[in-house]
Image (cartoon, rainbow, N blue to C red):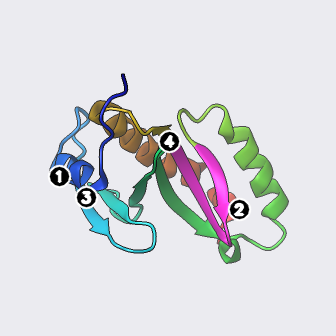
C-alpha cells in the first residue's frame, strides 16, 4: 500500500516558519504557472531560494546558480570539470543546466515524508553555497 503523496500547498504550510535543528528557518510561497512550484527561502540565504515541484514520481528541488554569461572568458571547460568533480562528493545533489542557467538539484520519491523533504531542502541549501564557493574562481 502506498503512502499519501504530499501536495505543494500542504508542503508550503508545513515548511512556512519551520526551524531546523541548525537554526535555519524556512519561508515557503506558492508560484502559480504552467508548472506550479513552491519557492522556499532559507534564512540568511534568501538570495538562493529553492524551487520545489511535485509530480507523480518525484519531488524535485532546484536552486539556481549562475548563467552562462557569468562565466569568465576561457574558464568554461575548467568550470565544467570542477562541477563533474564535485558531483559525487556533494551529498544528495547534482548539477545540471536549463537553457543558459546552471542549477543544482536533488530529487526524492513523491512518497517521501516531510522529514525527508526538510532534510533535502537543508542539504541543497548548504550545497548551493558550497558549490558557489568551490567554483567562484571561474565566475565573474
Report which residue position mark 1 lands on: 13
Q: From the viewer's perspective, is the residue at label 2 or at label 3 nearer?
A: 3
Q: Is residue 22 left or right of residue 110?
A: left
Q: CA distance from mark 3 to mark 4?
A: 22 Å
Q: CA gap, disc 4 to disc 1?
A: 21 Å
Q: Nearer the viewer, residue 56 or 86?
A: 56
Residue at image mark 3: 28
**Secondary structure of residue under mark 3:** strand
Q: Nearer the viewer, mark 2 or mark 4?
A: 4
Q: Nearer the viewer, residue 7 or 133?
A: 7
**Numbered range of the magenta stretch:** 94-106
State the quadrant of the C terminus. bottom right
Dot 3 and dot 4 residues touching (CB under 8 Å)? no
- Residue 28 higher or lower than 118, as above or below: below
- Numbered tag placed on residue 138 in the rendering: 2
Q: Earlier in the sequence, mark 2 or mark 4?
A: 4
Task: Spot the residue most to the front.
Answer: 1
Of marks 1 and 2, which one's residue comes earlier in the chain? 1
Q: Nearer the viewer, residue 134 or 20?
A: 20
Per the image, the residue denoted by label 4 is: 57
In the rendered image, the residue lying farthest to the top is 1
The mark that comes first in sequence, 2 or 3, is 3
Residue 17 lies in magenta, yes or no?
Answer: no
Amino acid at each position: 500500500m502506498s503512502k499519501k503523496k504530499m501536495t505543494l500547498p500542504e508542503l508550503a504550510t508545513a515548511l512556512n516558519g519551520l526551524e531546523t535543528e541548525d537554526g535555519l528557518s524556512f519561508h515557503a510561497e506558492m508560484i502559480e504557472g504552467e508548472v506550479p512550484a513552491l519557492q522556499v527561502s532559507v534564512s540568511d540565504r534568501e538570495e538562493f531560494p529553492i524551487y520545489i515541484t511535485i509530480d507523480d514520481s518525484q519531488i524535485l528541488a532546484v536552486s539556481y546558480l549562475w548563467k552562462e554569461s557569468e562565466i569568465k572568458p576561457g574558464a568554461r571547460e575548467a568550470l565544467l570539470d570542477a562541477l563533474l568533480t564535485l558531483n559525487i562528493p556533494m551529498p544528495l545533489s547534482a548539477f545540471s543546466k536549463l537553457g543558459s542557467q546552471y542549477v543544482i538539484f536533488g530529487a526524492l520519491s513523491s512518497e517521501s515524508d516531510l522529514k525527508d523533504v526538510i532534510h533535502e531542502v537543508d542539504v541543497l541549501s548548504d550545497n548551493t553555497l558550497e558549490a558557489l564557493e568551490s567554483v567562484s574562481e571561474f565566475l565573474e
